[in-house]
Amino acid sequence: MNGIQFIEKGGRREYAVLPYPLYERLLDLLEQFYDHDDGFRIPDNLLRRELAGESPVKLWREYRGLTLEQLAAAGMETVELERIERDVSAASDELLTRVAGSMAVPPRVLMA
């Protein structure tokens, strides 16, 4: 799970030691949440999976029950969507904004 180490006490997880890049990402997500609290909430299971390294674009697409083809019908190429599901940093902010609009999520939740 992205190099997270757990320290147990009495057979229960007491602490989690995070790799620094993951810690920074978590801080960034928290900052975005508090700076832009527009009432939009990210389900816990999606946040956990994203922090574990899964693509936010793929997570939200699946959460919304969309196939790649259905999402592409909003004016994008399936190949392009597959590429950004593998590497969201390869997508422009403009493209991520269009994808976010198609899935009814704020663009900030898709941007790395």
Image: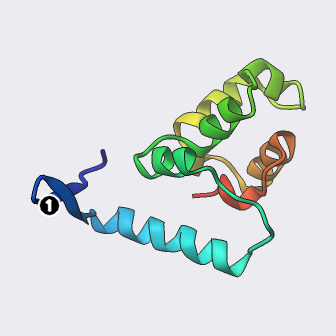
Count every numbered label the image shows and give the total: 1
70 to 35, vertically: above or below: above
Residue farthest toward the front in the current orientation of the protein: 10
32 to 104, vertically: above or below: below
Q: Between residue 40 and residue 109, name the one nearer to us.
A: 40
Which residue is depicted at the point 55% across and 51% down?
A: 44
Helix, strand, or loop for circle 1?
strand
Q: Is residue 52 left or right of residue 80?
A: left
Figure quadrant of the C terminus? bottom right
Q: Between residue 65 and residue 7, name the one nearer to us.
A: 7
Give residue 38's position: percent from left, percent from top: 80, 70
Q: Which residue in the structure is indicated by mark 1?
A: 7
Q: Is residue 76 left or right of residue 13?
A: right
Which residue is depicted at the point 65% across and 72% down?
A: 33
Q: Is residue 3 left or right of residue 112?
A: left
Which residue is depicted at the point 53% across and 35% down?
A: 86
Q: Between residue 75 and residue 65, name the one nearer to us.
A: 65
